[in-house]
Amino acid sequence: MSIINLLNQIKNEEVVLPAIQRNFVWPEDKAPRLLDSIMRGYPSGIALLWETYLDLQYRTFDGAFHPGQIHDFKENKRKKKLKLVLDGQQRLQSLYIALYGSYKGKSLYLDVLSGRDSDDVAEEKYDFEFLDKAASRNGRTKPWRSMWTARLAAGVTGCPSISLRRCKSGQQQHKKHS
C-alpha cells in the first residue's frame, strides 16, 4: 500500500486511532526530517494496523494539530470495518499533517529548488519548513510551495511504498507492497 493511499484512508476515517493510543508528541522538526528520508527513498518504518468490526472507542487523526488539544472519541456501535493503528501513529500523524493539515496553524512548505547532493547522509537534502501563509510569501528568497501544491504541480499520484503488518483475527501477516 502506498503512503498516499494510507493517508487517504486516514482522511476518509477508515484508518483511525484506538482510544488507548497516546497523543501525538513529535516536535515540529521531525515531520520535515521524515519527509526528507522518504524523498531520499530511505525506509520509513512500518505501520501495524488491526482490522476489526468490534464496538471500540476510537478517534480520528488530527488535521489541525495544536499541543494539548482534547480529543473527541467515537464508538463503533454500527460495527463498521475500522483499521486501528497499533504502531506507527507518530509517523502517520506527521505525514497526515504534512500533506493535509497544519501544525500549530502552519502548513508544511517545500523549497522546490532544494534537493542538493551531499556526501553527508546525516545532512538534510530537501528543505521543508512549517510556515504560515504570510511567511511563505513575504520576505523569503526561496521558492516555497505548499506540500499540496508541490504534489499537484509535480503530478504525483503516489509516494514511495511502505510495508504494513495487518492483524486479522489475531494472526499477523507481513505484506510487502511495491
Image (tube, rainbow, N blue to C red):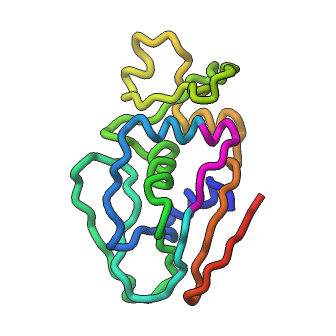
**Residue 165 image position (x, y, % from top left):** 62, 70
Task: Point out the stretch of residues depicted in magenta.
Answer: 37-46
Rendering coords of residue 38 (x, y %): 63, 42
Residue 34 image-quadrant placement: top right
Per the picture, the main secondary structure of the magenta-coloured stretch is loop
State yes or no: residue 64 in magenta: no
When the figure is inspected, residue 5 is found, relative to residue 126, above or below; the finding is below
Q: From the viewer's side, name the closer residue of 173 and 67.
A: 173
Q: Position of residue 35 (x, y in %)?
A: 56, 39
Query: Which residue occupies the foreground of this view, 109 or 50?
Result: 50
Residue nearest the viewer, comparing 119 with 19: 119
Residue depicted at 41% across the width and 68% down the height:
17
Is 44 contained in the magenta span?
Answer: yes
Image location (x, y in percent) of residue 156? 70, 42
Q: Residue at x 63, y 23 (%)?
A: 120
Q: Residue at x 50, y 10 (%)?
A: 141
- Residue at coordinates 33% horizontally, 79% vertically from top-left? 57
Q: Quadrant of the N terminus?
A: bottom right
